């Protein structure tokens, strides 16, 4: 019986090690893939500004012209910053807020939010879902070690260590 417990413990510790090794790649995948998607949708909003203004006006979003520029710029710039892993948590926070507004602005998507605990499928299938998920993942876990944020943190830590010597 003791050998079974040891085997289970060994297998569990290996699963933890494998999962920990996958974390940087998981974060990098989400940042690169959905950062690019943010960039493309933001660029589309900027290039098709008039159509976006009309759409925002139809949703009764205040100041549709200004908001179209803001959202397009946020998504475009935010996508690039996610790809680079630069200022990741602040931009992820802003993008998560943007995607929350996207859910709450469209009546059909708003209903999916309010009925989340009754039926999650519409919420999970709505256009903003993976954008919101990515923003929340990056906000909560950071960009990972394969990022400019990590490189900057290492550089600062190295300079602090050198200053103490």
Image: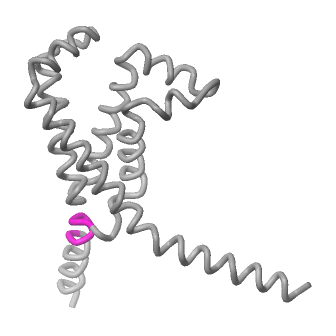
**In percent of the image, x 38 and y 47: which residue is there?**
134
Q: Quadrant of the N terminus?
A: bottom right
Seen from this angle, which residue lies furthest right? Answer: 1
The magenta-colored residue range is 147-152
Relative to 107, residue 20 above or below: below
- Residue 59 falls in image quadrant: top left
**In percent of the image, x 35 and y 38: which residue is there?**
96
Residue 151 in magenta? yes
Residue in front for this viewpoint, 69 or 49: 49
Image coords of residue 122 (percent x, y) = 51, 27
Image coords of residue 146 (percent x, y) = 29, 69
Q: Is residue 12 left or right of residue 86?
A: right
Q: Quadrant of the C terminus?
A: bottom left
Residue 157 in magenta? no
Q: Is residue 129 left or right of residue 51?
A: right
Relative to 51, residue 155 above or below: below
Relative to 66, residue 94 above or below: below
Q: Main secondary structure of the magenta part?
A: helix
Residue in front for this viewpoint, 49 or 132: 49
Image coords of residue 149 (percent x, y) = 24, 64
**In percent of the image, x 10 and y 23: which residue is there?**
49
- Residue 98 falls in image quadrant: top left
- Residue 14 falls in image quadrant: bottom right
Q: Is residue 152 left or right of residue 98?
A: left
Q: Is residue 85 left or right of residue 9?
A: left
**In percent of the image, x 31 and y 46: which residue is there?**
92
Q: Which color scheme did the rendering employ for the protein? A: one colour
Image coords of residue 66 (percent x, y) = 11, 20
């Amino acid at each position: 019986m003791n050998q079974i417990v040891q085997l289970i413990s060994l297998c569990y510790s290996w699963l933890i090690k494998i999962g920990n090794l996958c974390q940087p790649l998981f974060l990098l995948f989400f940042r690169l893939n959905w950062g690019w998607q943010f960039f493309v949708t933001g660029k589309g909003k900027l290039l098709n500004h008039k159509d976006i203004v009309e759409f925002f006006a139809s949703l009764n979003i205040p100041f549709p012209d200004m908001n179209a520029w803001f959202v397009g710029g946020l998504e475009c710039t935010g996508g690039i910053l996610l790809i680079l892993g630069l200022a990741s948590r602040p931009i992820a926070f802003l993008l998560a807020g943007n995607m929350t507004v996207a859910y709450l602005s469209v009546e059909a998507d708003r209903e999916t939010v309010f009925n989340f605990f009754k039926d999650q499928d519409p919420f999970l299938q709505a256009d903003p879902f993976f954008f919101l998920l990515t923003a929340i993942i990056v906000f909560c876990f950071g960009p990972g070690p394969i990022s400019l944020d990590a490189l900057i943190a290492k550089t600062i830590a190295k300079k602090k260590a050198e200053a103490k010597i």
